[in-house]
Amino acid sequence: MSFRVMPLAVLLFLASGCGREPAGGEEPSAPDRARDYFSDANIAQFATRHLELDLAVDFDRRVLKGHVIHQMECLQPGAESIVLDSRGLHIDRIQLAAGGAAAVDLPFQLAPADPVRGAALHISLPAAYACAGGFELKIDYRTSPQASAIMWLAPEQTAGGRHPFMFTQSQAIHARSWLPLQDTPAVRTTYEAVIRTPPELLAVMSADNDAQAPRNGRYRFLMPQPIPSYLLALAVGNLQFSPLGDNTGVYAEPEILPAAAWEFADTQDMLEVAEAIYGPYQWGRYDLLILPPSFPFGGMENPRLSFITPSLLAGDRSLVSVIAHELAHSWSGNLVSNRTWRDIWLNEGTTSYLEARLMEALYGKRRADEERLLTYQSLLESLQTVPLAMQPLAPVFESGDPDEGQQGLEYAKGQMLLEHLEALFGRDTFDRFMAGYFDHFAFQAISTEQFLDYIDEHLLQARPGIYSRDDLQEWLYQPGLPAMMSVPHSDNLDAAAADAQAWASGELPVDKLSKKNSWSPQAAIYFIKALPAGLSEDRLAQLDRALGLSATQNAEIARAWFIEVAKRRHLPAYAGMREHLGRFGRTRLIEPVYRELVANRRDAGLAAEIFAQARSAYHPLTIAAIEPLLPDHNLQ
Ligand SMILES: [Zn+2]
């Protein structure tokens, strides 16, 4: 056997094995709030403690091929089969080794694929196997070219245009499409990896990247801190590195590296501010990886190496709140994780709160309040569209798709809850509470109810009479928003909204408006959103010329403008809108524009046509978000 055997592992072969029930986890009483309904893994019986990956990256076939070794622990005597999550994997061979004994081949079976969860991989242990500690499970496999976690990009889809690129996006339940594993945030593992690539490319992972590693097509990684599966991450491309601070830096294609290093120059300061409030950064280095435009999100908090959309490169550092967000996940999410996908607000809501705090510390209360008000506005909008059943912070979430559950409501509503608590208890008290919370649950996955018990004991009861457990439960278990809450306020944005009214009514001439270049990008967005209905094509065209809206390099201003363009059917800006939809693949920037095109009742066909042209450059998650909006899914 070529793979390493755990020194303490013991495998006992006993003459037994009759009459045992198939393993698969006990059926819990429903609804079981601690159960992950989106994983088939039998984690009550076995737990992976460490993963060893050895994968070759084949750009021609668009597959990863190699093996993974699970260092597993048996938790329940009598368990005789292991169930792992998988999606679209081709499994070649599975072997078991333990206690220095010769490795044995294990029979296995892939269950019929569930459209959301994928195909459960059932692995039978030897009939005489007795659960007695640790063992190793080696699985030889390859991925499908359609793996839901992996985006393969042709050279022309990169900034440089000469080399291919690939990246993974494991959250929520896509890790199972690039390795068979217990794909649930309830399980944390350390990992190591050998990644084999074409020699001219560099591989990076959510691990101990070495910017100085010789570029030879064979890269080794170690992630010594245990992480949930959704944080496993790999990217390969023509990447170079630029340091930003003592333990921060940025990886990007050389064509955009200088712009990225300039845009994100404050990353080291952000890290130090976060440590001062929330306690030591636990992950060693914090680097950024700037991906090609098809990356579906603003950022993904892969530990030690956040994956970042290039749409943040506005040239004015106005969109760095996304960096503050991903960095903040180093505490909320990566350090203290959601136990199941119904608890994701503990991850995203808390992070959105931390993000606002970091923005305030670095750029001042005025800017942070502007961003808070935009967040609140987005929350009010999402309360109009998210089904009531998914509006509680911790909804009953037992079916559907974890990528679609609350449609982002959990970010803003969670942030508003923590801001309300901060306002009630005072910033110093609340900061101490949060730092203690991160320390208490470090490297654990917790449920909403564990959070509730902890905050009840350490904040609510410690300062009685301010806020009750019932008050808090209204946020967690009821739709909408509580009547009593702290609402963000921004004089700047109020002024921008007043300008929109004044310009629309003719009181404020456009040349006066265009002199308001002191507007922050956030104020410009608020202005656009505040424009009243019924403006003529001429007036909108005048506004576009005066403010340079269609030509803006700021992706968030462009988003706000092209949503209005589509909603109002402002045809003179349709060329710019088409360019926007082809330029970005980040779902947030384009999905609402498609949505408005369909909703204006005249341009559904146009939306389908633009989508068909741009589709090959979009990520599968982006396609999945937009395609159902379109009238004819077959137009491709
Ligand atoms: Zn986040």
Image (cartoon, helix red, strand yellow):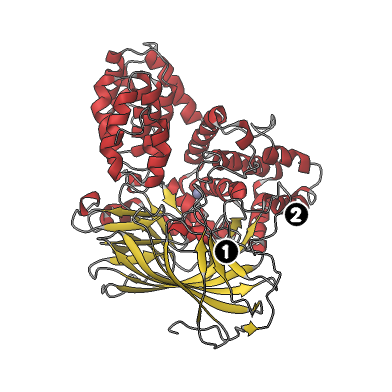
On screen, residue 569 above or below 486: above
Quarter of the rendering occupied by the N terminus:
bottom left
Picture residue at 50% right of the left edge, 57% below the top? 230
Picture residue at 33% right of the left edge, 38% below the top? 554
- Quarter of image, res 533: top left
Is any part of residue 609 visible from this angle? yes
Pinpoint residue 26: horizontal percent, then vertical percent: 70, 59
Circle count: 2
User: What amino acid is at disc 1?
Assistant: Val
Mark 2 nearby-residue class (10 Å; few <14, some 14–19, many ≥20): few
Quarter of the rendering occupied by the C terminus:
top left
Pinpoint residue 581: horizontal percent, then vertical percent: 30, 35
Picture residue at 38% right of the left edge, 46% below the top? 620
Q: Mark 1 points at which residue?
A: 83
- The secondary element bearing badge 2 is classed as helix
User: What amino acid is at disc 2?
Assistant: His
- Of 21 and 424, the residue lying toward us: 21
State which tag comes first along the sequence, 2 or 1. Answer: 1
- The secondary element bearing badge 1 is classed as strand
Q: Name the residue under label 2.
A: 458
Mark 1 nearby-residue class (10 Å; few <14, some 14–19, many ≥20): many
Pinpoint residue 492: horizontal percent, then vertical percent: 47, 30
Which residue is outermost to the left?
162
On screen, residue 411 above or below 458: above
- CA separation, marks 2 and 1? 38 Å
In the displayed structure, does residue 529 sit left or right of residue 489? left
- Of 223 and 322, the residue lying toward us: 223
Residues at marks 2 and 1 touching, judged by CB atoms closer than 8 Å? no
- Quarter of image, res 64: bottom left
In the displayed structure, does residue 164 sit left or right of residue 594? left
